[in-house]
Amino acid sequence: MVEELVDRVCCRGGSVLVIRDCVACKGCFLLQYLLIKLLMETNIRVVMLGLVEPFSHYARIARKQGCSLQSMRDNGRFVFLEQSQLLTLQGNGTDDEANVTSFSDNPLAAVYLKVREAARGNVVVDPAVDGGQKTCIMIDDASVLDIIAGGDHNFVLDFLQYCRALTVKKQRCSVVLLTHQDVYEESPVSSMNLALEYAADTVLTVEPLSTGLAVDVHGQVTILHRTVQMEIQPSQLKAVDEQELYFDPVK
Amino acid sequence: MDTKGRSFVRRAASSGGSIQAIGARVGPHGNSLVSSGLLSPLIGALQIIGGGIPIGGIVMVMEDLEAPHHLLLLRYFMAQGLAHGQPLLFASPLLSPRSFLGTLPGLAHGDESKSIRTSTEKNQEGGELRIAWQYRRFLAEQQELSDRRQRQQELTQAWSSSVLEQRSTSNLQVQDYNSKFDLRRPMERALFCAETVECVCLQGSGILSQLQEKCATFCNKLSRLGPGPQQVGRIALQSLCAPQCMLSLSEWEMMAFLNQLKSTLRKTRAVAFISFPPALLKPSFSARWQHLADVLLSVEAVEDDDKTLEAMLTDYRDIVGFLRVHKLASMNTQVPSVPEAGSYAIKVLHKRKVVLEQLQQAPIDASGDQSGAADTNGNSVEMGLHRRNSETSQHQLETVTIVERCY
């Protein structure tokens, strides 16, 4: 089920994949899984906004799975933008280009410009592939964007829409983002959860088992494809560092 | 050794590599850990909260409004740092935060060892007095025999001397890693009046910018890439979202500060310990705070005369509160750390030391009352299965509703 996501969603331009998790069960392993799959099995470029963990965190996990993010970074296949880079750019506020854009009052405008610059730089035009190399933007995690935007969810939704509409060599970018379900569950119910679900082509929900965490079973993933009618079945999972993830369907 | 001939050359330590520093030890996944100062006599001090706090991580403690147990944890965290001579930044809503440092527990091992030594000396003297004169020759023979055995052992085990040395050094390291404290003894004044200890009062206007500045300068001195002595700094923030602190602040400003602090800590040799009352925050913000934490704990008070708890727990009278482990750090790995025990009982022994004990609870019949068993660790198997079945059916129902809404 999860193996199909790379072809189904991430390789399609303009598609959005949302991973939702909660405090009891982190969903960042899915992001890491998709990152390794994209880099190892396809020729897609990945631009990652690492808003939570530093590059060394992702590189160390990838190394255990036989993928060198450092070499990918060196040859331009993988671009990693740390929060400190994005925030210093945002703090300057002197970028002329930011003032020109239609959403310059958005604190995330500067972040978007940085993402665009990273996505369009060092693109290799492959003559074998029609239209050139595809790009995927990964965001870990989108709830930090709320903090940068000062709590205005509309700014975040605008930012995501701009990322989705971004074109690199006539190819639209796909977006994979991690967010937390429980930060939007409040009365009156925030529209953010629904808005994200509406924008997404596929929603992955990561939950703990009702009996809590265990050494053998770390949680449960429910995949919801909004565009294709499919049977929804929760899968139990175990996150392993050295190997790939194993997903066992619930019986 | 010539490194040119090698095919494998180790790169310089990146920001995520382990750090060799005083009071730190190597942990899993290339992390270095510092002690939280907490002690457990049964399962070993190193097993609590994943063996220690990873450097660059944040520990958050959710306070109980009815009990000050978070202060115990905070005191031990700071006292451990001062015992290792580590720089400390303490921020508190108290008017004079430095006076709080006077309540930190002092080191106990010096006195304990002295008392042990004196007690053994006394025993020896007493023993000599008690032994009758006619048995002394038997004692001398026994002494000769034991000396001979010792010599033989020394000869046979000479080959393993290096192993023994290693063991003794590792024991020393472990002993140094976690100090013993005595609540009755105050911390030595020289330790908390040092230049490396800074205090900030979280009251008044503009406190957040002041705190932000202090944290930035504190972390700049402890950069992982910078030269200088390898020291680990500790940041302790008490009741960060207390009403006194939030008078002129919005919740988003506080979130921005925490987010900034987390990203800064990842690049420095420092750890942060933050306590906050979740009851004073909105649920969504409380969840955001919890997501920011690497290690998430909560403390709870014990009711004075809770008959059900008294029946379930042994040593109920000694227990002052509960410590619950919600989340453990998973830095440089994607495998979640599953705590051995979800709940610990906080005990104060002889008014001297705080110890944490894993809760041992007798199995309860599933047909009985669930309220007591639901919030403590070590539920019966029957109870666990019962809960699992009921909630799985709920989950399936939820999934069905999502399908209907989408198609």
Image (cartoon, rainbow, N blue to C red):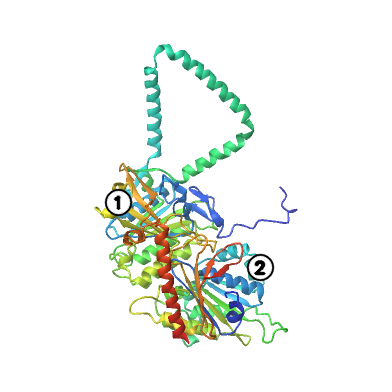
Relative image position of residue B273 (x, y in whole percent): 40, 57
Give me the chain letter of mark 1: B
The residue sitting at the left extreme is B305
Image position of B212 (left or right of A53): left
Q: Secondary structure at mark 2?
A: helix
Q: Quadrant of residue B135?
A: top left
Number of callouts in the render? Answer: 2
Tell if the residue under mark 1 belongs to the same chain as the one under mark 2. no
Residue B399, picture quadrant: bottom left
What residue appears at the point 32 percent right and 69 percent down from the top-left corner?
Answer: B281
Task: Tell me the element at label 1.
Answer: helix
Do we see residue A1 in this rendering? Answer: yes
**Towards the viewer: B347 or B161:** B347
Residue type at the position of mark 1: Ala
Q: Residue at x 47, y 63 (%)?
A: B264
What amino acid is labelled 2 in the image? Answer: Ser
Discs 1/2, front: 1
The chain under label 2 reads A
Q: Nearer the viewer, residue B306 or A152?
A: B306
For disc 1, the marked residue is B311
Q: CA distance from mark 1 to mark 2?
A: 61 Å
Provide residue B37's location: percent of width, then percent of height.
41, 49
How far across and down, in percent of the image, does residue A146 sit? Answer: 43, 76
**Can you name the residue that lies furthest to the right here?**
B5
Q: To which residue does mark 2 refer?
A: A71
Q: Are marks 1 and 2 in contact (CB under 8 Å)?
A: no
Is residue A157 something one can see in this rendering? Answer: no
Q: Is residue B375 left or right of residue A148?
A: left
The location of residue A235, given as percent across then percent down, is: 52, 71
